[in-house]
């Protein structure tokens, strides 16, 4: 819901005398390391528990144990976590790609075309920023689930494939492109499609990548909506699929499998985040999606 | 150009997903028709059901029964209703006893009697409903018709870890509330020194409340517990009702009842008992299978007793709990018959007996009981008999037959919440129940406005 | 039978709306030299009076239409008397709000357009003169094709459900029930007179305020330490911000393990070190703090990331100059750094608030399931509980709309505080 434009941070290493440049304040390092340990402990412990039985958890064992393969068998073979993760990947990739295409086109239309009443159309898109889907989830379910009778990938993807914030991102990006570029293209006799394909897309890869990272995380983390709309087990995304591991069974272990599932479900977004941190920042600096 | 590559990949995937193939098929061994069945188990009971589905598939290769597991009955029902409204309902669902009236009102299901008609077998599977034990048939036949196929029937019983009881020298299992309190007082030193984390636990779930209400021969709704006519009032302010919630509050405040803080925590409570954190648990007789397996693995001596009652009021009887299997309406004759055949196979004499041995659910057929006695099962496993005795000894009254009304599922949640309020917040139990009663009555009134013809 | 006749209400709307517009038009006619001639000559004979009359008529009808957009479909039911001839004051209040909001909305819109038209401006705005725009019919067609999917999807999957939510909120509706019933404002009345709902609203705001405070202050503190180039700075930064990539669901699962009543390792540590335990998930007065803790852990990395970027943009010479002038570290921070960071702080307040109100759903669902004793049931959580688990669609829609007013509030706040820094439209 929030769209705030923040100037891209300029990381500028100012030249300062060496003794000022590296303030070796040892206590800063200590505080930071403690902070990192505190931040990391929950996930470290979850990883440890993923290798344990319930009895070991009840005994507060802080070191890994040898039951990983048993928990793995439950999570992977009996509860189909890989299938849930595949669903999440498909939904995230398709939704993100679709969003990139639609908002690229809309952004281009807003910047490079003369449309009567542009502000009206733009206002129509703008107002949706105030309408988070969560608020109308019940009515959206009536539309998508009951009237359209969708319950699978379509239901998870199509309603979210257009986005006001992504459109703004491209509009903003295109508006910063000098108008000489489109003038020159027109003089060369390029039609809008050629201009889009030959000029706009090649110079927009950074913006597309930024959008991709943010939207991938957004799509991967979606929970409430798929929980409502997807009833078929084989089509559930991983955030919802984790529910099949909650509280386990009366006879089996509950903590280990759930933690293993949680750790597995965290790997893709963590990889995306760590490797594409820069794109993530630049994307978010422009816009934050609902 | 990593991002370019991603983009192109995404494009390809988009195309693939949007071109979803639609296939209609006849049921053949090469491409079997799928029957989805929703089941509220995730443990060895799920495995048992999956094994039966495989056996059925071997008998009838043109059909494939796919079992979908749910952690509990409530989410199962939620999911079924959503799927039904989305126009893609599964063929078979397991519905708990309190959903009966709603299931009939919803029009989602086809009564079993209607599917069977006057046949004595469906696809070679015998129909023999006269064989069903009376307490089950009286609960699930409505207007002389079978609405669904009986499968799992249970009642809450008390399990005790004798190893822990031996530490303080308790020999006899408590039978009453007062007995539990005494035993807990005796066990308190073990709690204090950290050997155990509490004395007794049962899931905080309206089911236990309903059982205690029946024990005190008190009805939950008016109009003959909903059996004479549609009820218009939920009765949560009765003396018996206040008595039950008051006991919860007392037990919690005394530190005897070890609340996990999670409502409807069926697995968590049993896990705590299995990990020897508590000497007593009251839970469904259907947990007997799992608890005895765990006990055997860990050298625990587990004994069972009947559900405890208030000695000041006395014991009238317990209500049956559990679930039956319902078949969705509008499947088409071929699938419908296949679903029925599967359920008949699922609950035939041998399978009912083996189901009882796996889980601890009461065998629903007289012939299964006979088979088990013949095999000497009960002599070897007396803990599996407790539930049958408890149900068998119950007097049949309006109260012990159990209530029937459309908002039973929601009302159960309201009761569960009220009990949690009474325990965690303290305060006047009667006031908490009065508020809960009002809430339940509003729901019932709204339900009647929407479902009952004027 | 009505408390106030709908006709009287409409007359009132016409009177106030018409009067307001008459005044507006008269002022416009007096102030501006170039103003459009009215199309009907009799109105032009005495221009000011003609314009005033025209404004009155236009404003009056706009207000009537506005009053009708909400109350018309409802058939003025909030003002209806019940069977006993009694009026419900809550109903009437709600009716008045709908009446005023609807009339104001349409009236403002029409007046804006009308004044534009009077000043001879194009109603839909001037065409852009930016060079390099594609023109001509084929360009127009392409633009339409480019915009159509976005507009279509937003219209179908956002605008229509919004509209449907309004309709649903006036009904008694259960998922799967054979019929629905129109109940006017009953769903809202039930909520407004329900102490439990009041608590839910309080819980939502309590959580939001604490999550914002905790995550922003802690992350600013940490960012202060790592924003300067230092040994291992990149590694520190990555190791501090990664939890943001994890979903609220994962955060809920992981913290549920840490805070577990019997198996929780955190309590075990506290017990070993200090000899007491905390009922993280069992006590209604502690559980909200547990949710705050987990949420802060989840979202703090995001705030650190932005504060680092912000701090790197604070001119060091300014700080050095202040240091030379004798300002101590605290003074430098509160007088210089913090004010310079305010755009980022504001952005983070909005994002974190959004997280607390909406995204925290998954976390709460796995950590506390809204308990104990509904102490962590937020407005969002309740919408799902009522609408999906209890299948009470009407009441859930009413709850959604009340939640929606919060969103509008946050958005307005956002526009207010960020004026001049946001560049949206033309």
Image (cartoon, coloured by chain):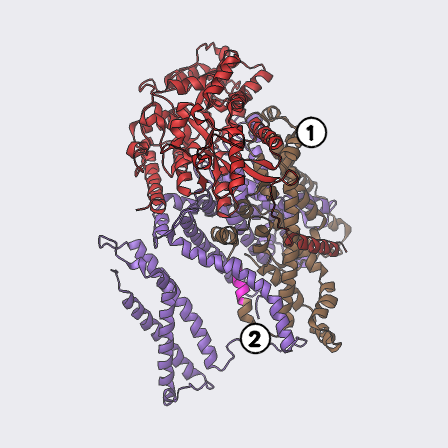
Q: Is residue B134 left or right of residue A207?
A: left
Mark 2: few/some/many CA within 10 Å (<14, 14-19, 20+): some
Q: Residue at x 62, y 38 (%)?
A: A262
Tint of chain B: red
Q: Secondary structure at mark 2?
A: loop
Res. A69 mark = 1
Secondary structure type for disc 1: helix
Is residue B103 visible in the rendered image? The answer is: yes
Q: Residues within 10 Å of mark 1 (few under 14, many from 20)?
A: few
- The chain assigned the colour purple in the figure is C
Residue C270 on image: x %, y %: 56, 29
Q: Main secondary structure of the magenta part?
A: helix
Q: Is residue C297 visible?
A: no
Percent from the top left, x then y, of residue C215? 57, 46
- Residue B4, given in percent of the width and then of the height, sits at 74, 57
**Residue interval drawn in magenta:** A123-129
Chain A representation colour = brown
Q: Nearer the viewer, residue B304 or A126?
A: B304
Residue A116: give its label.
2
Quadrant showing the N terminus of chain B = bottom right
Q: Which residue is at the front of the view, C338 or C103?
A: C103
User: CB of mark 2 within 8 Å of CB of mark 1?
Assistant: no
Picture disc at residue C324: none
Q: Tell me the subunit letter for badge 1.
A: A
Q: Position of residue A183 (x, y in %)?
A: 71, 76
Q: Chain of mark 2?
A: A
- Could you tell me which residue is drawn at 72 percent across and 50 percent down? C229
């Amino acid at each position: 819901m929030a769209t705030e434009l923040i100037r891209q941070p300029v990381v500028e290493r100012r030249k300062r005398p060496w003794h000022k440049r590296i303030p070796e304040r040892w206590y800063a390092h200590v505080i930071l390391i403690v902070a990192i340990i505190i931040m990391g402990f929950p996930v470290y412990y979850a990883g440890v528990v993923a290798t344990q039985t319930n009895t070991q958890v009840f005994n507060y064992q802080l070191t890994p144990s040898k039951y990983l393969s048993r928990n793995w068998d439950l999570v992977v073979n009996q509860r189909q976590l890989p299938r849930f993760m595949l669903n999440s990947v498909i939904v995230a990739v398709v939704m993100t790609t679709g969003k990139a295409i639609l908002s690229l086109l809309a952004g281009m239309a807003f910047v490079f075309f003369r449309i009567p009443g542009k502000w009206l159309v733009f206002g129509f898109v703008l107002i949706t920023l105030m309408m988070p889907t969560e608020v109308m989830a019940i009515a959206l379910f009536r539309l998508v689930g009951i009237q359209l009778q969708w319950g699978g990938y379509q239901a998870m993807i199509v309603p979210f494939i257009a986005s006001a914030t992504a459109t703004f991102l491209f509009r903003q990006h295109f508006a910063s492109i000098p108008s000489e570029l489109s003038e020159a293209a027109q003089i060369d006799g390029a039609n809008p499609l050629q201009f889009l394909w030959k000029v706009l897309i090649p110079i927009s890869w950074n913006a597309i990548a930024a959008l991709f990272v943010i939207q991938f995380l957004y799509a991967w983390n979606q929970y409430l909506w798929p929980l409502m709309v997807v009833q078929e087990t084989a089509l559930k995304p991983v955030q919802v699929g984790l529910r099949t591991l909650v509280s386990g069974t009366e006879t089996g272990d509950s903590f280990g499998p759930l933690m293993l599932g949680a750790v597995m479900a965290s790997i893709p977004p963590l990889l995306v985040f760590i490797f594409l941190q820069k794109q993530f920042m630049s994307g978010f600096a422009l816009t934050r999606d609902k | 150009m990593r991002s370019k590559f991603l983009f192109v990949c995404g494009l390809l995937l988009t195309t693939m997903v949007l071109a979803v193939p639609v296939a209609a098929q006849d049921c053949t061994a090469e491409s079997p028709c799928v029957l989805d069945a929703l089941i509220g188990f995730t443990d060895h009971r799920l495995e048992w059901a999956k094994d039966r589905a495989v056996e059925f598939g071997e008998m009838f290769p043109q059909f494939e029964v796919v079992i979908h597991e749910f952690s509990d009955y409530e989410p199962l029902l939620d999911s079924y209703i959503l799927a039904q409204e989305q126009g893609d309902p599964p063929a078979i669902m397991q519905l708990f006893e309190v959903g009966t009236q709603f299931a009939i009102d919803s029009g989602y299901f086809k009564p079993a009697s209607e599917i069977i008609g006057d046949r004595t077998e469906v696809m070679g599977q015998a129909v023999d409903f006269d064989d069903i034990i009376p307490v089950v048939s009286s609960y699930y036949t409505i207007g002389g018709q079978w609405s669904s196929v009986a499968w799992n029937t249970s009642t809450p019983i008390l399990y005790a870890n004798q190893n822990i009881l031996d530490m303080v020298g308790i020999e006899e299992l408590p039978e009453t509330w007062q007995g539990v309190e005494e035993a807990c007082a005796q066990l308190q030193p073990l709690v204090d020194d950290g050997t155990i984390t509490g004395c007794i636990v049962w899931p905080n779930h309206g089911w236990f409340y309903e059982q205690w209400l029946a024990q005190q021969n008190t009805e939950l709704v008016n109009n003959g517990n909903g059996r004479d006519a549609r009820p218009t009032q939920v009765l949560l302010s009765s003396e018996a009702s206040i008595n039950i919630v008051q006991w919860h509050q007392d037990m919690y405040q005394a530190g005897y009842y070890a609340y996990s803080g999670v409502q409807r925590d069926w697995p968590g409570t049993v896990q705590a008992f299995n990990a020897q954190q508590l000497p007593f648990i009251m839970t469904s007789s259907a947990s007997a299978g799992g608890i005895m397996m765990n006990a055997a693995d860990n050298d625990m001596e587990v004994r069972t007793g009947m559900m405890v009652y208030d000695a000041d009021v006395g014991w009238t009887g317990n209500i049956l709990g559990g679930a039956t299997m319902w078949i969705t309406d509008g499947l088409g004759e071929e699938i419908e018959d296949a679903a029925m055949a599967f359920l008949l196979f699922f609950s035939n004499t041998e399978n009912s007996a083996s189901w009882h041995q796996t889980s601890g659910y009461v065998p629903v057929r007289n012939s299964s009981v006979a088979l088990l006695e013949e095999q000497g099962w009960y002599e070897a496993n007396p803990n599996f008999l407790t539930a049958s005795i408890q149900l068998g000894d119950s007097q049949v009254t309006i109260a012990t037959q159990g209530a029937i009304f459309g908002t039973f599922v929601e009302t159960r949640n309201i009761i569960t919440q009220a009990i949690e309020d009474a325990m965690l917040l303290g305060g006047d139990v009667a006031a908490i129940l009065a508020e809960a009663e009002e809430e339940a009555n509003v729901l019932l009134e709204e339900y009647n406005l929407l479902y009952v013809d004027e | 039978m009505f408390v106030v006749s709908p006709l009287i209400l409409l007359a009132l709307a016409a009177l106030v709306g018409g009067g307001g517009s008459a005044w507006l038009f008269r002022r416009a006619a007096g102030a501006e030299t170039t103003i459009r001639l009215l199309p009907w000559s009799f109105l032009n004979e005495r221009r000011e009076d003609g314009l005033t009359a025209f404004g009155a008529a236009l404003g009056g009808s706009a207000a009537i239409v506005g009053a009708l957009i909400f109350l018309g479909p409802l058939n003025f039911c909030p003002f209806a008397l019940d069977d006993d001839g009694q009026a419900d004051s809550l109903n009437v209040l709600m009716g008045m709000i709908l009446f005023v909001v609807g009339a104001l909305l349409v009236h403002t819109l029409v007046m804006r357009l009308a004044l534009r038209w009077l000043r001879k401006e194009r109603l839909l705005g001037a065409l852009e003169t930016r060079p390099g725009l594609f023109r001509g019919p084929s360009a127009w067609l392409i633009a339409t094709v480019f915009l159509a999917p976005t507009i279509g999807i937003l219209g179908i999957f956002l605008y229509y459900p919004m509209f449907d939510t309004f309709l649903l909120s006036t009904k008694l509706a259960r998922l799967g029930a054979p019929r629905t019933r129109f109940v006017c404002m009953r769903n809202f009345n039930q909520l407004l007179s329900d102490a439990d709902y009041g608590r839910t609203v309080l819980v939502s705001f309590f959580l939001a305020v604490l999550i914002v405070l905790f995550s922003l202050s802690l992350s600013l503190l940490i960012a202060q330490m790592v924003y300067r180039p230092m040994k291992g700075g990149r590694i520190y930064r990555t190791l501090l911000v990664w939890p943001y990539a994890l979903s609220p669901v994962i955060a809920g699962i992981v913290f549920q393990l840490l805070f577990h009543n019997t198996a929780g390792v955190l309590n075990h540590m506290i017990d070993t070190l200090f000899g007491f335990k905390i009922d993280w998930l069992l006590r209604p007065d502690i559980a909200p703090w547990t949710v705050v803790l987990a949420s802060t852990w989840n979202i703090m990395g995001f705030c650190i990331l932005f504060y680092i970027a912000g701090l790197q943009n604070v001119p060091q010479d300014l700080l050095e100059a202040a240091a030379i002038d004798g300002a101590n570290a605290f003074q430098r921070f509160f007088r210089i750094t913090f004010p310079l960071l305010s755009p980022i702080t504001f952005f983070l307040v909005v994002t974190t608030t959004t997280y607390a109100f909406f995204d925290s759903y998954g976390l709460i669902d796995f950590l506390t399931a809204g308990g104990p004793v509904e102490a962590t049931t937020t407005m969002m959580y309740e919408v799902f509980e009522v609408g999906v688990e209890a299948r009470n669609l009407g009441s859930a829609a009413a709850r959604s709309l009340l939640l929606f007013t919060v969103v509008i509030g946050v958005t307005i706040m956002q526009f207010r505080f960020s004026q001049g820094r946001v560049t949206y439209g033309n």
